[in-house]
Image: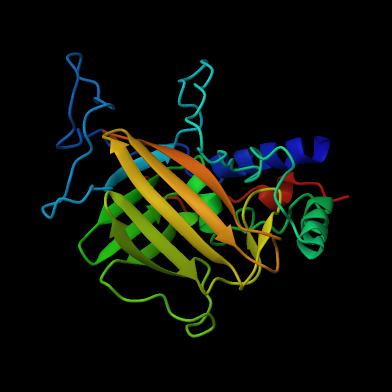
Amino acid sequence: MKKWIHIATVLAMAVVLSSSLSAQWAKHPTKGVPRTADGAADMNAPAPRTADGKPDLSGNWVRFANPGGRGAPAPPPPPGTPPVATFGEVGAGFPDGLPFTPWAAELKKQRMSVQQKDNPDALCLPMGFMQFHTHGQPRKIIQTPEMIVIIYEANYGLRYIFTDGRSLPPPGEPQPWWYGYSVGRWEGDTLVVETNNLRGDGWLDVRGSPYTDQAKITERFRRPSFGKLEIDITLEDPMAYTKPFTVRVNQQILVDNELIEFICNENQQFRKLIKID
């Protein structure tokens, strides 16, 4: 437990130290934001829609860990809601943990035994997008009719989701990518995104929960109101998990702010701060 607390603290410090502490964009009001009488963004206003009537997921988003608000207990989720994933532990909401295969359980144990020093985030490499979804730094979604682009401030990540009607390619056809190959389609007001052709050495979370090149990830994006984005993520990976599992990530809109330039290797302190036994 002490090692886990140590690595989480070091990662948080590395994020701060590796960015320029004075780097902030000038404040500029976001256009088209519904406002309350006091000028704050109306988070409960209806979600905006595109010209063809689909929910518009565009905007700057930040992880929203506690729907109850800061310092308040989160309200109980509706029945059937998937457990909420955390940056530290994707399976934190499962009473018995994730359904690891013996191979995956041993690999996670090995990763933790060296204080997660090989986590891509710690090495300024592209993270798996489960880590990106739960990361404390924000992300920007740009939605067009044929493609959705997600720009992650953390490690300057960039992900493409093709929504032009193409099919998901067979496993192994394109070269495996850090973010895999993603195609999306609309089912009513839900954007369903399927991803495969991932690299085989992925990390789902800081504690090293693995995924392999056999993984297929299905995300369901919903924007139930102006201020809220729900993402349900289902992972199928027969090499790493004995059965598929689903988790939820909650996001909140971030208005009147922009992503900053984040060059992870600039003033990188992780290797200096961590102590390997």
Q: Residue at x 53, y 80 (%)?
A: 171
Q: Residue at x 49, y 29 (%)?
A: 77
Residue 205 in percent (x, y) is at: 63, 50
- Determine which quarter of the picture holds residue 241: bottom right
Q: Is residue 147 above or below residue 2?
A: below
Q: Residue at x 43, y 46 (%)?
A: 231
- Determine which quarter of the picture holds residue 61: top left
Q: Is residue 204 visible?
A: yes
Count of marks overlaid on the render = 0
Residue 84 in percent (x, y) is at: 55, 38
* Residue placed most toward the observer, 182 or 60: 182
* Residue placed most toward the observer, 71 or 156: 71
Residue 200 in percent (x, y) is at: 64, 71
Residue 253 in percent (x, y) is at: 33, 36
Q: Is residue 115 above or below residue 6?
A: below
Horizontal arrangement in the rendering, residue 70 relative to residue 142 (left or right): right
Q: Is residue 50 above or below residue 161?
A: above
Q: Is residue 266 visible?
A: no
Q: Residue at x 37, y 49 (%)?
A: 221
* Residue placed most toward the observer, 223 or 77: 77
Q: Is residue 70 above or below residue 277?
A: above
Horizontal arrangement in the rendering, residue 25 relative to residue 73 (left or right): left
